[in-house]
Amino acid sequence: GENVEQHPSTLSVQEGDSAVIKCTYSDSASNYFPWYKQELGKRPQLIIDIRSNVGEKKDQRIAVTLNKTAKHFSLHITETQPEDSAVYFCAASITSYDKVIFGPGTSLSVIP
Amino acid sequence: DAGVIQSPRHEVTEMGQEVTLRCKPISGHDYLFWYRQTMMRGLELLIYFNNNVPIDDSGMPEDRFSAKMPNASFSTLKIQPSEPRDSAVYFCASSFRAVGRLGTYEQYFGPGTRLTVT
């Protein structure tokens, strides 16, 4: 089955700097890659997603890139703010199967 | 819509007791997922339903766990008997599959039930 790895497990950046979280997946049939943000004590919420027919997607300060050949995808957050502090989960899915496999998460701390 | 509703929000029980967690998905959503979250194992998919039918229960840890979805607006996750290692936050999530067009497949999570088994 699908396996999703995520690095780093913790990340600390200064406010205003960029943060990058990287994920790899094992099943070449995966075609949908969402990213969820979970603030402390809250529920995970979708922040951005990308499909396999697209190499990059951007939404304001966040962007995702996908390398299907290498089975890598990444989340980029620019101009980080303290409210970006949270745990970020990458995930991979084969949409025809509906099942989403989450990575272990990255705890991001933005230092004011 | 009020979003996904879960009850109870917190549950403390003694080892050996039966625990029932409840979920009401967003109206109109046709998929429902049960997840367990712990520090050690992260976010694990336990089981998911499509149109009230269980599709994949391979994540259910053992026979002590069972889940049902008797109708489109209600699901339960039951643990009997409960054990201390079952202590975790249990999330229910729902989604709407936009069949035939490019939907987002976004999963909407409930607030979770924090279960503590002593």
Image (spheres, coloured by chain):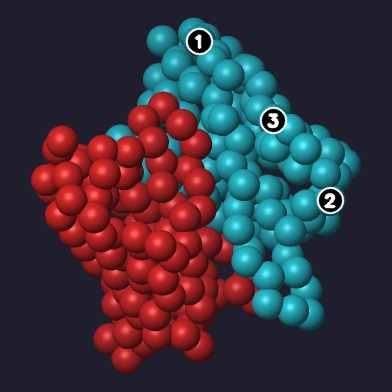
Chain colours: A red, B cyan
Residue flagged by tag 2: what amino acid is it?
Answer: Gly
- The chain holding disc 2 is B
Residue A32 image position (x, y, % from top left): 51, 73
Q: Which of B78 and B29 is in front in this view?
A: B29
Q: In which quarter of the image is residue B116?
A: top left
Residue flagged by tag 1: what amino acid is it?
Answer: Val
- The quadrant in which the N terminus of chain B is found is top right
The residue at which mark 3 appears reads as B5
Q: Can residue B107 be seen in this view?
A: yes
The residue at which mark 2 appears reads as B28
Mark 3 residue element: strand
Circle nearer the viewer, 2 or 1: 2
Instruction: Say if mark 1 contacts mark 3, CB within 8 Å.
Output: no
The residue at which mark 1 appears reads as B12
Residue B103 image position (x, y, % from top left): 68, 70
Which callout, 2 or 1, points at the residue further toward the start of the chain? 1
Q: Callout 3: few (<14), some (14-19), or many (20+) C-alpha neighbours within 10 Å?
A: many
Residue flagged by tag 3: what amino acid is it?
Answer: Ile
- The quadrant in which the C terminus of chain B is found is top left
- The chain holding disc 3 is B
Residue extending farthest bottom? A69
